[in-house]
Amino acid sequence: MYALSVCEDERLKLAINLSFSCSLRLGELLGLTWDCVDISHEAIEENRAYVFINKESQRIRKESLNALDGKDVLLVFPTNHKKNSTVRILKTPKTESSVRKVFIPRSVAQYLIELKQEQDEIKAALGNEYHDYNLVMATTFGLPIGDSYLRNKMQDIIDELGLPDVVFHSLRHTSVTYKLKLSGGDIKAVQGDSGHAQAD
């Protein structure tokens, strides 16, 4: 993909790679935490590095949060603006089949290793100023990244290079289609290990 080769935003580059290689929805990508990632040296060497999808990030209206009464909500991120009518949350997926382990290519594992090292250095430098929610996709200060950040960054590249106008979500669709073709239509092969899979 040409856009990847010229992309200078490391977060966007990782997001595109993860979304395509793992067929992730945007909320799943933004809700991914380091405890659900195995990029150990052994896992990479044995070709079994993976991400475990068991939650998603979502922005919802405050009244919707009250209606949920804590059901399916794992974490409510604090907001700096009291007047905000919405909050960002980490929640369990809509369906059981959305919970799955997805094996990742070595190249994507390497991106994750580099990001983890960078985050650890930033954490050490910022100390208490870093808000550690254990998020893979986080701002410099550890806060959750919003959907619009990735969408806007991707649109910037599209506009700058005059590429076909595609939305971020289309990466998942392209990924699923590609994997279905490779697997001869085996939907289970595309979904990864789902159901009762557990993170190690």
Image (cartoon, rainbow, N blue to C red):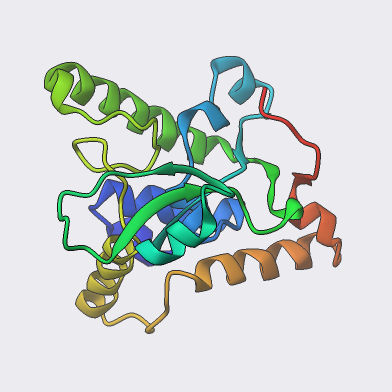
Above-or-below relation of 177 to 48? below
Q: Residue at x 33, y 44 (%)?
A: 77
Apparent side of residue 42 relative to residue 80 in the rendered image (left or right): right
Q: Residue at x 77, y 65 (%)?
A: 180
Apparent side of residue 48 relative to residue 87 in the rendered image (left or right): right
Q: Quadrant of the N terminus?
A: bottom left
**Front-lying residue, 11 or 82:** 82
Q: Quadrant of residue 179?
A: bottom right
| Spot occupied by residue 132 in the image (x, y as percentages of width and height) | 30, 28
Q: Quadrant of the C terminus?
A: top right
**Front-lying residue, 15 or 194:** 194
| Spot occupied by residue 83 in the image (x, y as percentages of width and height) | 16, 62
Above-or-below relation of 132 to 139? above
Residue 61 seen from this side = no
Residue 84 seen from this side = yes
Q: Residue at x 50, y 61 (%)?
A: 67
| Spot occupied by residue 35 in the image (x, y as percentages of width and height) | 52, 26
